[in-house]
Image: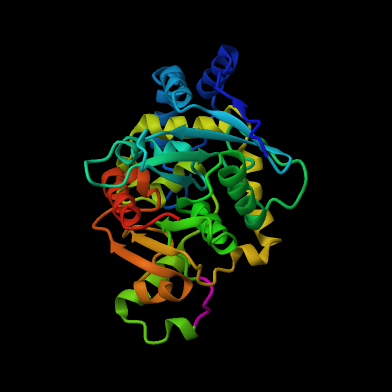
Amino acid sequence: MVSVHRPAPIHVAEEDLDDLRERLRRTRWPEPVPAAAWAAGTDLAILHELCRIWADDYDWRPHEEWLNSLDPIMVPVDGLELHVFRASARRADAIPLLLLHGWPGSIVEFRRVIEPLVDPPSGTAAFDLVMPTLPGFGFGGKPTEPGWGVTRIAEAMHTLMATQLGYTQYGVAGGDWGAIIGSRLSQLHPDAVIGFHTNMPLFGVHRLPSWAEGADEHELDLLARWDEMDVTAWILEKFEAWSDGGLGAFVTEDLLTNLMFYWIPRSVASSAMIYYESRLDPEGRVHPAPEVPTAAAVFPAEINPAVQRWVEPNYRLARYTEMPRGGHFAALEQPALYAQDVSEFFAGLGRG
């Protein structure tokens, strides 16, 4: 099959930016609630200041220019157009790497790791990065029919890499939904996936109490933290709650650029459909051990906490790294640690 992808730079109309600024300035703010900061939702004072910055200081155009420097293309796959961003190492030994984001993220999650992955220190692995926007997210296509669960998305990602872009073998990396889709992709196409790197290793196949039998005090604390984590609320609150150090772990402009992927293309509702669709795709959420070598990078503030013995039954675990700091948005919070772990893992894997 000959690829029929087309260039797809982002050009947000100035009137849409003006409309956003006006809406932000006209926000009707609620009264503060009698609770500690972040205990009952997003801190009102922080939200107020972020919206002021978004309306008065934030300039979308430099970020749009950066995104368009990543060779964005629209690629038709399974009746849907995937918006794909790319960065090349331009080295003969570069490894094709599919980077998969999650919710409430976007490819902005990878902003700080692109350069160290495509232009790494001498003697380490370099990558040709493929960073698709998941179906229903961002500026890409939105499904108009049901059925876009984890399995169908995983198959679409393989078609993107193998059929449309011509990579017969490639690596996969991701957290959040990228971890779930990447795991499923590894199951479905072990001959194509040379390795899978995840910063959210999964252990949900095994049910309590059998797989947690003998848990020590630290492991019980992790389980309690996981059980307390809610899975709904606003995007900003998730970056606060799911990170190591709260919003201070991020560059404000990165947070706002990520929000633009939801606001401008009106993808808040369509992106959330992955949660609904995944419930209708039970096989997509089951994770028996993939046949491909897997690296688990465990960041201490990850919302899906894990210890090695919990995740080993689910993977062909080739590398397990306990990171000193970082949380759920690892590539954006700790880009140096993340990029180093990805590079070291894939450097030892052969192709073909």
Q: Quadrant of residue 139?
A: top right
User: From the viewer's perspective, is 202 left or right of 124?
Assistant: right
Q: Position of residue 165 (x, y in %)?
A: 56, 39
Q: Quadrant of the C terminus?
A: bottom left
Q: Is residue 170 visible?
A: yes
**Range drawn in magenta:** 204-208
Q: Position of residue 47 (x, y in %)?
A: 43, 35
User: From the viewer's perspective, is 120 left or right of 201?
Assistant: left
Q: Quadrant of residue 214?
A: bottom left
Q: Is residue 205 magenta?
A: yes
Residue drawn at (56%, 44%) of the image: 161
Closer to the camera, 306 or 153? 153
Q: Position of residue 319 (x, y in %)?
A: 33, 65
Q: Position of residue 107 (x, y in %)?
A: 47, 38
Q: Please tell me whether residue 231 is drawn above or below residue 310 in the rendered image.
A: above
Q: Is residue 38 visible?
A: no
Residue drawn at (30%, 53%) of the image: 341
Q: Please tell me whether residue 175 is drawn above or below residue 75 in the rendered image.
A: below
Please name the predominant secondary structure of the magenta segment in the image. loop
Closer to the camera, 288 or 61? 288
Q: Quadrant of the N terminus?
A: top right
Q: How is the image coloured?
A: rainbow
Q: Please tell me whether residue 82 is drawn above or below residue 146 in the rendered image.
A: above
The residue lying furthest to the right in this view is 145
Residue drawn at (51%, 29%) of the image: 260
The residue lying furthest to the top in this view is 14
User: From the viewer's perspective, is 3 left or right of 37?
Assistant: right
The residue lying furthest to the left in this view is 122
User: From the viewer's perspective, is 172 left or right of 127?
Assistant: right
Residue drawn at (28%, 54%) of the image: 344
Q: Is residue 340 magenta?
A: no
How many badges with numbers are in the image? 0
